[in-house]
Amino acid sequence: MKASLEHMLWHPVVALADLQATPVAVTLLGEPLVLWRDGEGQAHAWTDRCPHRGARLSLGQVVETDCGGRHLACPYHGWQFAPGGQCVLVPARPDWTPPPGHAAGIHDAQEAHGLLWVRLVAPDAGAPLPDELTRPPPFEPGSLPGWRSVVCGPYAVATSAPRLVENFLDMSHFGFVHSGWLGDAAHAQVEAGHIEETATGVRASNCRAWQPQGYAGADGGQFVAYDYAVLGPYAATLQKNSVAPDGPRNAIALFINPVHDEACTVWFVMSTVNDPSTDESLRAFQDAVFAQDRPVVESQTPVRLPIHKGSSVDTDVPPEVHGPSDRLSAAYRRCLVRWGVTVGVC
Ligand code: FES
Ligand SMILES: [Fe+2]
């Protein structure tokens, strides 16, 4: 496997609530993976291919062992693989001990923010990563006392991951795509706020837009302020603080699995404090907002984010032009160039 930057980063692949007793098949950066949990509750992400005759391990099952553990069993000849990836049982010759090379392809996996994160290749000394990119992106509100987190998604989307990050960072579509929800076309002006490009991403504070109901319990529309952070090529957060000291505060993280260049799977982790909404209503709200975004983002051409001057996968597509409210999006594009991102861009 070629080890580009994207292969060394951590990406979300499944909500922990969706990883139960049966193996789950996902694709990350074009690589089919099987996800499963062992008897200790540890989650694993393996190449979804049996080393025997190449069948999909995700079509198999998680089986209980005599000593209370669990193995992943292939659907074809029933070979069983222990949590370390080693084949430990060949049912056609149960007395035979498979040699060490009879093993599944394993990848690093860890849990964070209610999701399972996977990296396909560990960074090596020859390709050092900024320290912050060697672990899943931080999302502090999700772990603060008193805050409640709800995982929304997955949403499978027919666009590139960078197009979705840019949509998340963009306030100037609120009045059009989310009219009556997050904005109003009669109050479409936005203020781009203070934008700072850091070694590891972008931070923007006091980004302002008008919202029909800025906060839970608000009486009419008002300007609201968001703080944004880009935490990696395919991860960003926003925080929206109440005008009242004990009022509701919301933070949303956008975490994306870049399935391949032109498809992705998205989760939003919503964290709130002092917000009376139920988990179900927070999910329903996010589902409705994303249903408004989907047709527009899936309509954008080229599908990949055009960050390189004069380059496009489709040479008939003219370059994109920018307005004064696109400063955060421009900073994100510069970040992608600086990081050397190749997946989802052109
Ligand atoms: S292909 Fe998996 S056991 Fe034969
Ligand atoms: Fe939107």
Image (cartoon, grey):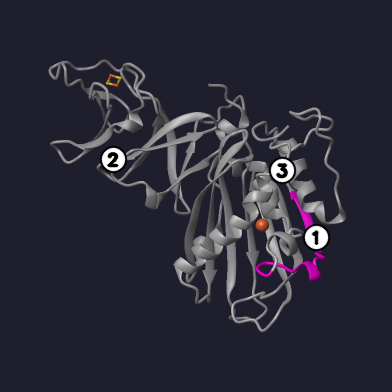
In the displayed structure, 317 sits above or below 201; it is: above
Which residue bears the numbered disc 3? 300
Q: Is the magenta stretch mostly helix, strand or loop?
A: loop
Question: Range of the magenta residues?
Answer: 180-197
* Amino acid marked by disc 1: Ala
CA gap, disc 3 to disc 1? 22 Å
Tell me which numbered mark, 2 or 3, is placed earlier along the sequence.
Answer: 2
Q: Residue at 54% of width from left, 59% of height from top?
A: 287
Ligand 2: which quarter? bottom right
The answer to which of 118 and 22 lies nearer the viewer is 22
Q: Quadrant of residue 57?
A: top left
Q: In which quarter of the image is the C terminus?
A: top right
Residue 233 in view: no
Determine which residue is flagged by label 2.
38
Q: In this view, does 249 lie above or below 88?
A: below
How dense is the environment of label 2, judged by Cα within 10 Å: few (below 14), some, or many (20 and up)? some
Q: Is residue 254 left or right of residue 297?
A: left
At label 3, the amino acid type is Gln
Residue at image mark 1:
192
